[in-house]
Amino acid sequence: MRKLTSAMRGVAGIVLTTMMSVALAAQTAPPGQDGFKAATAEDLAAGQEHLPATPFVFWAYGIVWLVLAIYVLSLWRRIAKTEREVAALRAKLEVRP
């Protein structure tokens, strides 16, 4: 149980570090761009569309899926351990007269 707690702390640290890095990167604007820039009719006609948040959305989904996968694996291992314990208890009860 102690190893599982240590592993979960490590994963939480990685997730927290990644989230802080993403937040710091989001605060820094590219040079020459001070906030929102409205699209002009020429930009829309030319089909220019810039989505600066795409990498952040990608990483956010990636982190969520990674945490979810780790959680599911953790549950899977705990359920398997519980099933082994129940089987051992059944075996002990069958041995008793």
Image (cartoon, rainbow, N blue to C red):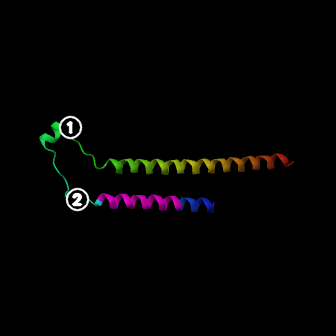
- The 10 Å Cα crowd at callout 2, few under 14, some 14 to 19, many 20 or more, is few
Residue sitting at 47 percent across and 59 percent down? 14
Residue sitting at 43 percent across and 48 percent down? 62
Question: Can you give x and y, in whole percent of width and height, for residue 32 in the image?
Answer: 19, 58
Q: Which residue is mark 1?
A: 47
**N-terminal of the two: label 2 or label 1?**
2
CB within 8 Å, label 2 to label 1: no
The reply to whether the magenta stretch includes residue 79 is no
The kind of residue tagged 2 is Pro
Give the quadrant of residue 33.
Answer: bottom left
Main secondary structure of the magenta stretch: helix
Is 29 left or right of 74, judged from the image as shown? Answer: left
Question: Can you give x and y, in whole percent of width and height, for residue 23 in the image?
Answer: 34, 59
Q: Which residues are magenta?
A: 10-26
- Dividing the image into 4 quarters, which one contains the N terminus? bottom right
Disc ID at residue 9? none
Question: Can you give x and y, in whole percent of width and height, for residue 8 in the image?
Answer: 54, 59
Residue sitting at 28 percent across and 49 percent down? 52
* Towards the viewer: 37 or 46: 46
Residue sitting at 71 percent across and 50 percent down? 85
Placement of 94 over or under 11, stated as above or below: above
The kind of residue tagged 1 is Gly
Is 83 left or right of 76, judged from the image as shown? Answer: right
Placement of 80 over or under 17, stated as above or below: above
- The 10 Å Cα crowd at callout 1, few under 14, some 14 to 19, many 20 or more, is few
Question: Can you give x and y, in whole percent of width and height, for residue 53 in the image?
Answer: 30, 49
Disc ID at residue 31? 2
